[in-house]
């Protein structure tokens, strides 16, 4: 391959990579109990179940419980 062909291939590859959303730019909409605990400041899961669980809607998928990040943000804003 000559340099021109390699440059064209690099341009095509660069275009493909720019069109793929990067994982760092994706935002999670639902958080697990462990993730909620870390998100609100490093609380324990018993604190989550005592303070947050009664006030914020959560959803169970199988045996795992998830809370929408927007619901946590709303709850935090109300508590300020």
Image (spheres, grey):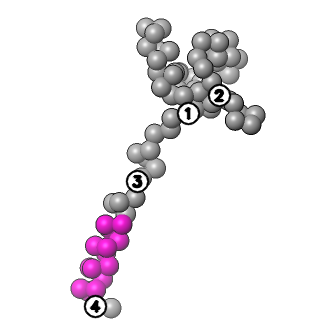
Q: What element carries label 2?
A: strand
Q: Indicate which label's residue lies in the foreground, 3 or 4.
A: 3
Q: Which x, y percent locates residue 35?
A: 59, 31
Residue 47 seen by the camera: no
Earlier in the chain: of badge 2 and badge 4, it is: 4
Q: Which mark identifies residue 59?
A: 2
Q: Name the residue under label 1.
A: 30
Instruction: From the image, state whether disc 2 or disc 3 is nearer to you.
Output: 2
The answer to whether mark 2 and mark 4 are in CB contact below 8 A is no
Neighbor class of circle 4 (other Cα within 10 Å; few <14, some 14-19, many 20+) is few
- Comparing 63 with 13, the one in front is 63
Callout 3 crowding tier (Cα within 10 Å): few <14, some 14–19, many ≥20: few
In the image, 43: left or right of 63?
left
> In 3D space, how far apart are the residues under numbered discs 3 and 4 (Cα atoms)?
31 Å
1 and 59: which one is in front?
59
Q: Say which quarter of the image contains residue 8.
A: bottom left
Which residue is labeled 3 in the image?
21
């Amino acid at each position: 391959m000559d340099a021109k062909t390699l440059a064209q291939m690099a341009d095509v590859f660069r275009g493909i990579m720019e069109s793929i959303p990067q994982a760092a730019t994706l935002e999670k909409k639902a958080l697990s109990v462990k993730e909620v605990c870390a998100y609100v400041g490093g609380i324990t899961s018993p604190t989550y179940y005592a303070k947050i669980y009664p006030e914020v809607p959560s959803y169970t998928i199988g045996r795992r419980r998830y809370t929408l990040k927007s619901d946590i943000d709303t709850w935090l804003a109300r508590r300020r």
